[in-house]
Amino acid sequence: MDPARENDEAQRAVLRARQTASQARLTAATVAHRQALVREMFAQPVRDHAGRCFGRPVSLLRAGYQASLDELGLDQLRRNGFEVTVLTVDEHGPAGTPADSRAAGDKTILGDLRTVPLRPRSFDIVHCALLLDRISHVELVLDRFTAALRPGGLLLLHIRDRDCAAGFLDRIAPQWVRRALWARLNPGQPGPYRAVYEAAGSDRGIRAYARLRGLVIAHRETARTSPAGSGRAAQAVSALRGLISQLTRGRLTDAYDEVLYVIRKPEDRVARVM
């Protein structure tokens, strides 16, 4: 073989090996990043429920693109051989939202959750994150979620609570202030979204709804999120939240601003709510 040609092929082989190694590192980094986003509070019940879906795909309804699929650990489920189908309902589509573990077969319907057709008892899991605070007719939407769930299905909710310092501040701030703060704290991201905060979508409202509809809150957690960034705007918002909590003697707490729920729809219609 010509030495020059042999040298060229050796160089191409080295280049291919480097590209393969680089791609492998990128893939490993992506997997590690998504694993870091998994929220075990949601992922563990999802895994347990998937194990009960014998011989059929796990069907999931995602309410809005703000609900990240990564926190459910769907990648791990799929790697373990489970088939998961996802239907996303959103008014505006995925533009401007972060990429997550969407699969090629996942579907999207553009429409209003209050009116878009949802077949009764057709989903194993409904996932709704950071949505209820910015829509109207929350109880109607929750009724549609509950009707769409199969008996024994999971309703995973992640809300911003109106009855805390952060929620109160977001509700009373003039729109021009909210826009200015959003531009400072979340540059380049879509928003700010409407600050509706219906009572039915608060922590107290969700718990009351579950009792009235015979749903079981299997797990509930609170979380405190700090304003994005570390500049003066973030410091001012944090200080205001603390001041509101002090002035209301903790009634509008700054200990948390978000609440997460794992809610189960009983298989037995007369199941007792604990």
Image: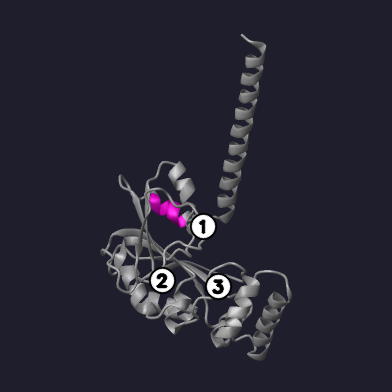
User: Residue 96: horizontal and vertical position, in percent?
Assistant: 51, 63
Q: Give the residue at x 53% y 59%.
A: 98
Percent from the top left, x then y, of residue 146?
A: 33, 69
Judging depth in this view, the residue of 122 and 29 nearest the camera is 29
Q: Which disc number belongs to residue 150?
A: none
* Quarter holding residue 28: top right
Residue span colored magenta? 45-50
Q: Position of residue 61 (x, y in %)?
A: 37, 61
Q: Considering only vertical position in the picture, is 59 above or below 171?
A: above
- For disc 2, the neighbor class at 10 Å (few under 14, some 14 to 19, many from 20) is few
**Amino acid at the residue labelled 1:** Glu
Of the residues under marks 1 and 2, which one precedes in the sequence?
1
Residues under labels 3 and 2: Cα distance?
A: 23 Å
Task: Judge depth for marks 3 and 2 and give the one in front.
Answer: 3
Query: Helix or strand or loop: what does disc 3 sit on?
Result: strand
Q: How many marks can you see?
A: 3
Question: Residue under circle 3?
Answer: 258
Relative horizontal placement of residue 235, taking residue 90 as reference (left or right): right
Mark 3 residue type: Glu
Secondary structure of residue under mark 2? loop
Give the SS element for disc 1.
helix
The answer to which of 110 and 57 lies nearer the viewer is 110
Which residue in the structure is indicated by mark 1?
71
Density class for disc 3 (Cα within 10 Å; few <14, some 14-19, many ≥20) is many
